[in-house]
Image: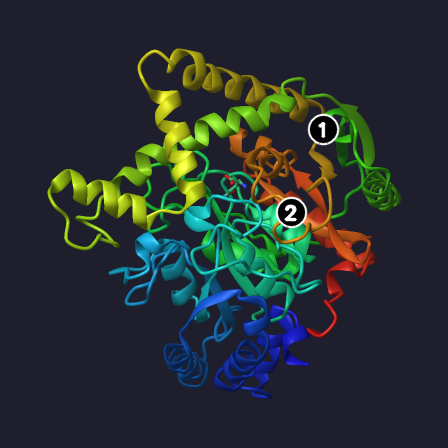
């Protein structure tokens, strides 16, 4: 079936004229119509625009002989990316009525490559969450078991990819929001190096951590998409101006001599069945010629508390722009300016966002700044230095993406600390600005689990290469949830 083909296979069928982009787009729109109600993965459908851009892609192919790898391939954007003329809600009541006046750079680049946007994906409100339960539009269900969460905050993008509602989807990862939901839904998710993909037009949560990336069915597909997304953008002041390597080109590079680091801190207390999956993967890598080395990052256990100071601090500043005046929601009949601010923010933001704003304001306030924010920044540096030292010994680090498979909807939502602990394996890479990738590596109780690869800055090509060779010898990434095959 069309929805199980890789991007390369779809592209070849388009090139040979076997199918058109309009037909392909109709196929996915029909799947969305049939399957999305049970998942709530998409919150805005752009069917008319999709068919128009598909027709344009067909014309570019036919008339101009264009052959770009994404020309005419459908995708879904996380609703954190501004999309010109299309509602961009960020999962919040605050932006429920916000029609973006321009495209984010990620959106513009994929559009220029000829990819066809089908719609916008549900997400945790302002990307704050690990379960997609904080969305104003209701929780996303995991296609592997609809009583379970898909992970968050890019839960809609992950669930949509897993359910084959599109060949790929965009996401963002501030503290794990691509890798964790990719793991819990059995897809491949890539969080690039901080600065590799432009943040322009991506609604800001924690600007020193936010990074855009991709969900796909394989590392090979992800390489094609990342190729189109990555690169310098003068409109993002932290975008880095170094050339983008040819990611698809090096997917099959031999792994002989690759040094894989096993992070002692990741294995301490790891559930036996989870550890067994990682060890199976290591055996495979060893058979491909890699060596394993045990490494330690002594400050890594501090990453969750560090993140939950730094991220809320930045969020409290970033979200101050939502004041009921310039963007989005405004309360009814305000008495005066203060009442307008208070009620617009009080009514527009959900509970988790308010918790983060309050925590962030507290850690930045006079008298507490030194004890919390400054301290967290120092620990962030120590964690970064630990990674740097580890990458002096090894080429990449390997470990689990999450402590457990997908948990039940409702199980952790009333206990923020338990929820935050779900991010234990992902947050370190964000604090250090490193690229990370999660790929499916097995099942526990019938639910997918992720293997995480973390590399030095700008090592995306190596991560994709290592993931691709794993996927050449295994078929976990090909398994689809029942009912979505
Ligand atoms: N789960 C983390 C949080 O709630 C990460 C979110 C993200 O990466 N956007 O902050």
- Residue at horizontal 53%, vertical 34%? 430
Is residue 206 something one can see in this rendering?
no
- Residue at horizontal 59%, vertical 52%? 247
Mark 1–mark 2 Cα distance, whole angstroms, equals 38 Å
Q: Nearer the viewer, residue 121 or 242?
A: 121
473 is higher (above) or lower (below) than 369: below
Q: Name the residue that disc number 1 marks.
A: 394
- Residue at horizontal 80%, vertical 58%? 446
Q: Residues within 10 Å of mark 1 (few under 14, many from 20)?
A: many
The yes-or-no answer for disc 2 within 8 Å of ligand 1 is no
- Of labels 1 and 2, the one closer to you: 2
| In this picture, residue 64 sits left or right of residue 426 | left
Q: Residue 433 at x, y = what percent?
A: 51, 33
Residue 411 — which label? 2
Is residue 246 something one can see in this rendering?
yes
Quadrant that contains the N terminus: bottom right
Q: Nearer the viewer, residue 15 or 164?
A: 164
| In this picture, residue 142 sits left or right of residue 136 | right
| In this picture, residue 468 sits left or right of residue 325 | right
Q: Residue 313 at x, y = what percent?
A: 39, 29
438 is higher (above) or lower (below) than 39: above
Q: Determine contact: label 1, label 2, CB under 8 Å.
A: no
Q: Residue 188 at x, y = what percent?
A: 65, 55
Instruction: State how many labels appear.
Output: 2
Disc 1, SS = loop
- Residue at horizontal 61%, vertical 77%? 12
Q: Which of the 4 image quarters holds residue 354?
A: top left
């Amino acid at each position: 079936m069309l929805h199980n083909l890789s991007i390369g296979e779809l592209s070849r069928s388009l090139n040979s004229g076997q199918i058109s982009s309009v037909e392909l787009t109709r196929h996915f729109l029909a799947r969305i119509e049939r399957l999305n109600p049970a998942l709530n993965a998409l919150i805005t459908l752009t069917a008319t625009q999709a068919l128009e851009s598909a027709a344009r892609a067909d014309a570019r192919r036919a008339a101009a002989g264009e052959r770009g790898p994404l020309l005419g391939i459908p995708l879904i954007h996380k609703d954190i990316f501004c999309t010109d003329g299309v509602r961009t809600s960020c999962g919040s009541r605050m932006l429920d009525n916000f029609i973006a006046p321009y495209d984010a750079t990620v959106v513009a680049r994929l559009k220029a490559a000829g990819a066809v946007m089908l719609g916008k994906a549900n997400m945790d409100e302002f990307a704050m969450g690990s379960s997609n339960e904080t969305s104003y539009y209701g929780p996303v269900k995991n296609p592997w078991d609809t009583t379970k969460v898909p992970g968050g905050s890019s839960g809609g993008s992950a669930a949509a990819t897993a359910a084959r509602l599109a060949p790929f989807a965009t996401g963002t990862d501030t503290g794990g929001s691509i890798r964790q939901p990719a793991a819990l839904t059995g897809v491949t998710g890539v969080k690039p190096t901080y600065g590799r993909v432009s943040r322009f037009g991506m609604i800001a949560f924690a600007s020193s951590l936010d990074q855009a990336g991709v969900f796909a069915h394989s590392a090979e597909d992800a390489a094609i998409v990342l190729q189109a997304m990555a690169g310098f953008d003068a409109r993002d002041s932290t975008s880095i101006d170094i050339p983008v390597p040819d990611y698809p080109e090096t997917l099959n590079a031999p792994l002989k001599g690759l040094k894989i680091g096993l992070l002692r801190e990741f294995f301490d207390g790891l559930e036996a069945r989870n550890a067994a999956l990682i060890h199976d993967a290591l055996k495979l890598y060893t058979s491909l010629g890699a060596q394993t080395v045990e490494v330690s990052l002594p400050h890594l256990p501090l990453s969750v508390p560090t993140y939950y100071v730094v991220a809320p601090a930045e969020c409290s500043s970033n979200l101050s722009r939502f004041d009921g005046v310039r963007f989005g929601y405004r309360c009814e009949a305000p008495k005066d300016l203060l009442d307008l601010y208070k009620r617009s923010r009080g009514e527009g933001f959900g509970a988790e966002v308010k918790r983060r704003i309050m925590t962030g304001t507290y850690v930045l306030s006079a008298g507490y700044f030194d004890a919390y924010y400054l301290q967290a920044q120092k620990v962030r540096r120590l964690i970064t230095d630990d990674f740097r030292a580890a990458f002096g010994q090894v080429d990449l680090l390997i470990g689990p993406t999450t402590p457990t498979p997908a948990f039940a909807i409702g199980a952790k939502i009333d206990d923020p600390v338990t929820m935050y602990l779900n991010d234990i394996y992902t947050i370190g890479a964000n604090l250090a600005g490193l690229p990370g990738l999660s790929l499916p590596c097995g099942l526990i109780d019938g639910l997918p689990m992720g293997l995480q690869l973390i590399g030095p800055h700008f090592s995306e090509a190596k991560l994709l290469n290592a993931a691709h060779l794993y996927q050449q010898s295994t078929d976990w990434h090909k398994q689809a949830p029942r009912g979505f095959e």
